[in-house]
Image: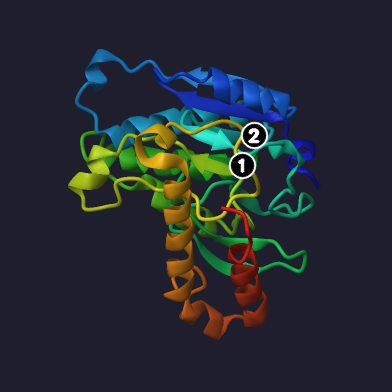
């Protein structure tokens, strides 16, 4: 099934960012876009940026719960590949236990390969993903817990916890064969720097050419950045971070996991 056949709704999360190019490219791909701009209130002035970002995603999840339909959720700095809607859905649409599926990954890992050759796995980035209605109640409960501990004033990597939250509810999460787009921002995250995390993250392998030029192309150089993203992906594969050794040892079909990991990287596409 194509992505557009599963859901034609895209929720674009934004604050003050310009989203017209993103909306136009997605609409040309057949999607119906809604831009959700979270108006941060005065009492939120000292909230951590990670918590404010969490709030924005929560509003999108509430929309999904209200309408009881899945949707693609993207952040304002996402740059899709051309014809994104025609790309294959990264999981079986008949499967009832799907939580979320990342369309863009960061620090990804693969846990298992389904009979239909879809990859169950993990990512720590929420730049672009599919959210199902079944996943929302557990994630809203998780948000309430984070709101109290550690609270809105502290940095917390909530995006790296979602997989664990959903797995605890017997929901499966999926990573794509290749990325459906790129994290296009050229602005490093100051909270990530303060906590000794990466300044920026890029896709390792894309499904195809990007729909428009990302912001980093001017400040960093497009091909230089894409090559660096590809090399980092190959390094993670070689160091056993994408398909981890302990996962391969206990897997029923380790060859399928390793084959998936190798095939996605060894492509001429940057």
- Do callouts 2 and 1 mark residues in contact (Cβ within 8 Å)? yes
Q: Which mark is residue 78?
A: none
Give the number of marks: 2
Q: Is residue 264 left or right of residue 139?
A: right
Q: Name the residue located 33 percent from the left edge and 30 percent from the top edge.
A: 52
Q: Which quadrant of the view contains residue 250?
A: bottom right
Q: Quadrant of residue 31?
A: top right
Res. 137 visible in picture: no
Q: Nearer the viewer, residue 72 or 182?
A: 182
Of callouts 2 and 1, which one flags the residue occurring earlier in the amino acid sequence?
A: 2
User: What label does residue 130 carry, if any?
Assistant: 1
Residue 68 position, x and y percent, is 67, 32
Would residue 250 appear left or right of 159 to someone viewing this image?
Answer: right
Hey, which quadrant is residue 176 in on the image?
bottom right
State the scheme by which the image is colored.
rainbow
Please provide percent x and percent y for residue 27: 69, 23
Helix, strand or loop at disc 1? strand
- Within 10 Å of disc 2 (Cα), the crowding (few <14, some 14-19, many 20+) is many
Question: Counting other residues with Cα less than 10 Å from the Cα at mark 1, is it few (<14), some (14-19), or many (20 or more)?
Answer: many
- In the displayed structure, would residue 11 be above or below residue 111? above
Q: Is residue 175 left or right of residue 197?
A: right
Q: CA distance from mark 2 to mark 1?
A: 6 Å
- Residue appearing at x 35%, y 43% in the figure: 145
Residue furthest out toward the bottom: 249
In percent of width and height, residue 269 lies at 61, 54
Q: Which residue is mark 2?
A: 71
Q: Position of residue 270 (x, y in %)?
A: 56, 53
Residue 97 in view in this figure: yes
Q: Is residue 77 above or below residue 254?
A: above
Q: Is residue 247 above or below residue 189?
A: below
């Amino acid at each position: 099934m194509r992505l557009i056949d599963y859901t034609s709704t895209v929720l674009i999360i934004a604050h003050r960012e310009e989203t017209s190019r993103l909306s136009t490219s997605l609409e040309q791909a057949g999607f119906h876009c809604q831009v959700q701009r979270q108006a941060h209130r005065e009492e939120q002035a000292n909230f951590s940026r990670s918590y404010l970002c969490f709030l924005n995603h929560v509003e999108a999840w509430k929309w999904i719960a209200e309408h009881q339909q899945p949707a693609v959720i993207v952040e304002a700095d996402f740059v899709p590949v051309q014809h994104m809607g025609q790309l294959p859905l990264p999981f079986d649409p008949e499967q009832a236990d799907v939580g979320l599926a990342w369309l863009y990954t960061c620090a990804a890992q693969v846990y298992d390969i389904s009979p239909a050759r879809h990859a169950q796995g993990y990512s720590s980035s929420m730049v672009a993903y599919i959210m199902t209605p079944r996943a929302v109640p557990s994630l809203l409960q998780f948000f309430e817990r984070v709101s109290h501990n550690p609270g809105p004033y502290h940095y917390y990597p909530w995006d790296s916890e979602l997989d664990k939250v959903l797995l605890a509810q017997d929901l499966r999460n999926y990573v794509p064969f290749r990325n459906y787009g790129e994290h296009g921002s050229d602005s490093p995250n100051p909270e990530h720097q303060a906590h000794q995390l990466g300044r920026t993250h890029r896709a390792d392998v894309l499904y195809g050419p990007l729909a428009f030029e990302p912001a980093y192309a001017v400040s960093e150089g497009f091909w230089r950045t894409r090559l660096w993203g590809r090399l980092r992906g190959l390094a993670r594969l070689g160091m056993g971070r994408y398909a981890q050794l302990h996962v391969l040892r206990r897997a029923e079909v380790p060859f399928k996991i390793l084959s998936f990991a190798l095939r996605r990287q060894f492509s001429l596409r940057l």
